[in-house]
Amino acid sequence: MTTYGKLGEHDVLRVGFGAMQLEHGDPADAVKVLQRAVELGVDHLDTAQFYGPGTVNSLIKTALHPYADSLRLVTKVGAVTHPTERLVAAQKPAELRAQVEENLRALGTDHLAVVNLRRADMTPGIVATGEQAVDLDSQLAELITLRDAGKIGGIGLSHVSLAQLRQALPAGIVCVQNLYNVLTRGHEDVLAECAAHGIAWVPFFPLGSAFDGFPSVGGHPVVADQAERLGITPAQAGLAWLLGHSPHTLLIPGTRDLGHLADNVAVARIELDPEATAALDALS
Ligand SMILES: NC(=O)c1ccc[n+]([C@@H]2O[C@H](COP(=O)([O-])OP(=O)(O)OC[C@H]3O[C@@H](n4cnc5c(N)ncnc54)[C@H](OP(=O)(O)O)[C@@H]3O)[C@@H](O)[C@H]2O)c1
């Protein structure tokens, strides 16, 4: 198994860091987690201006600015926070541009390695209706303009179907973030299409998330049993299965815990044996 993978033109450690969990909790602890992630070799950081809102990008800037040349900052656009709801769709091309500019400003940089277009066509999460139900091609045209201007290194997609990924391929897609983990494999067709085109597959909720209603990967008895047999943690077993399942997979597990962070980064060098792989393959 390889320790590094491709995110567009960049080689990155296959275990990055998803920053959403830093929305809550002690800011000083969050800064320590971010700095420790980079010390451990993480060079792929996933964020959004709507995490917080603004809090997470501000913590990243506090912790890591000025950024190492090797650090790939990846954000997502397509939603904004709202006074009474967690998120609302903001899918119009001009709104996408404004969100890219807001991420750049908040992070204190003039370049984002990748911007993921977070579509809002299916649950879980927001579903866009009315004037927010925007056609994909007009959104991609706006992101291409931003890429041509050098503000974006690559364009990614999030929460998309196989048909949408195929429609977007001419734009030059570098990664796809969909909900996927060892217990929840609804987008195997999208993963296969990513693999066929050398596109990074970056599953969100790789451990099942911190939200109620999603099965916890580490809480599954088969995952826990195999982990115990191998002398690793259940979370490590679930993440290692993802890396072994496709060489195009990059991980962005989220944590506020320094111990969990170290466990997660170590997964870049963990390969499950055939018995564990078969047992976890059978869990879908
Ligand atoms: N594109 C999109 O639409 C989208 C949507 C959602 C999320 N994302 C991104 O995906 C990233 C990952 O998703 P997520 O953070 O929601 O969920 P996740 O990574 O599946 O799970 C996070 C949960 O797992 C726990 N955890 C992490 N490492 C652990 C370990 N080694 N052992 C035990 N528990 C562990 C965390 O708690 P502790 O803090 O206690 O470790 C937290 O409760 C996000 O941070 C975000 O950057 C993208």
Image: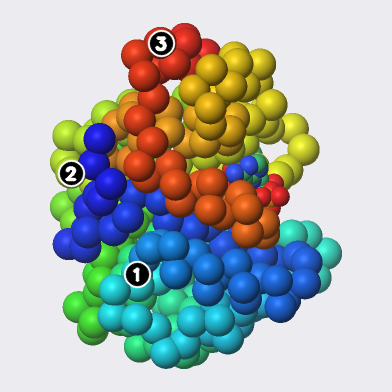
Amino acid type, label 1: Arg
Amino acid type, label 2: Gly
Amino acid type, label 3: Glu
Q: Are marks 1 and 2 in contact (CB under 8 Å)?
A: no
Say if 16 sits above or below 149 in the image. Answer: above
Note whether ligand 1 is within 8 Å of mark 3: no
Return the x and y of residue 7 as percentages of the image width and height.
26, 56
| Among the 4 quarters of the image, the one containing residue 248 | top left
| Among the 4 quarters of the image, the one containing residue 53 | bottom right
**Residue indicated by mark 3:** 275
79 or 108: nearer the viewer: 108
32 relative to 9 in the view: left or right: right
Q: Is residue 146 visible?
A: no
Say if 149 sits above or below 284 in the image. Answer: below
**Residue indicated by mark 2:** 198
**Residue indicated by mark 1:** 72
197 relative to 82 in the view: left or right: left
Q: Which of label 3 and label 2 is nearer to you?
A: 3
- Lower sequence index among marks 1 and 2: 1
Return the x and y of residue 22 as percentages of the image width and height.
66, 65
- Lower sequence index among marks 3 and 2: 2
